[in-house]
Amino acid sequence: MTAPRHSEYKYRAVTAVQRRLNPVLRRLPFQTVLETTGRSSGLPRRTPVGGRRIGGAFWLVSEFGERSQYVRNIKADPRVRVRIGGRWHTGTAHLLPEDDAVARLRSLPLLNSAAVRAIGSGLLTVRVDLDV
């Protein structure tokens, strides 16, 4: 199997699992959730994510980079909300393709980072500057 075909298979398999798992995860009160505005519908879209708040910013790494639906939504409207520890915070998301996403994962929660490294391809760092 060629690398591009392998990446496509991985993407389809992971998104199929996430489609079933995410509705359950985002209901858990202390699961970190990123809320974007749907680029076509204009409706709120909530995605469970792993990441860490560092100072006035929340950092995460998208496992499929610009193919992730929430990244596509951020490109259309960078205003987002993040639920951290059960509290919602508003902010502005920034896509950072120049950041070393693998190195960034070392500063984020271990379990999520391991999963992103294992299943991801085309990693992309996202920083959300939280409003004060």
Image (tube, rainbow, N blue to C red):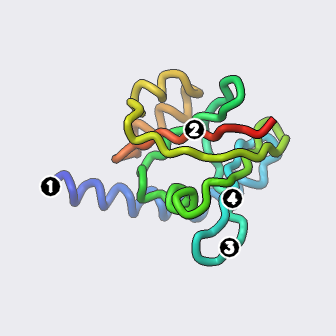
Q: Which residue is mark 1?
A: 2
Q: Are marks 1 and 3 in contact (CB under 8 Å)?
A: no
Q: Residue sitting at 55 percent across and 44 percent down?
A: 94
Name the residue type under label 1. Answer: Thr
In what element is the residue under mark 1?
A: loop
Q: CA distance from mark 1 to mark 3?
A: 37 Å
Q: Can you give x and y, in whole percent of width and height, for residue 99 in the image?
A: 41, 32
Name the N-terminal-most of marks 1 and 2. Answer: 1
Q: CA distance from mark 2 to mark 4?
A: 17 Å
Q: Which residue is mark 4?
A: 46
Name the residue type under label 3. Answer: Gly
Q: Which residue is mark 3?
A: 42
In what element is the residue under mark 2?
A: strand
Name the N-terminal-most of marks 2 and 3. Answer: 3
Q: Residues within 10 Å of mark 4 (few under 14, many from 20)?
A: many
Q: CA distance from mark 4 to mark 1?
A: 33 Å
Q: Can you give x and y, in whole percent of width and height, for residue 52 in the image?
A: 64, 30
Judge depth for marks 1 and 3 and give the one in front: 3
Work out whether residue 120 or residue 54 is closer to the camera in this orientation and state it.
54
- Picture quadrant where residue 24 is located: bottom right
Work out whether residue 125 or residue 115 is closer to the camera in this orientation and state it.
125
Q: Which residue is mark 2?
A: 127
Q: Residues within 10 Å of mark 1 (few under 14, many from 20)?
A: few
- Picture quadrant where residue 32 is located: top right
Question: Quarter of the image containing the N terminus?
Answer: bottom left
Q: Is residue 94 visible in the rendered structure shown here? A: yes
Q: Residue sitting at 43 percent across and 43 percent down?
A: 124
Work out whether residue 122 or residue 25 is closer to the camera in this orientation and state it.
122
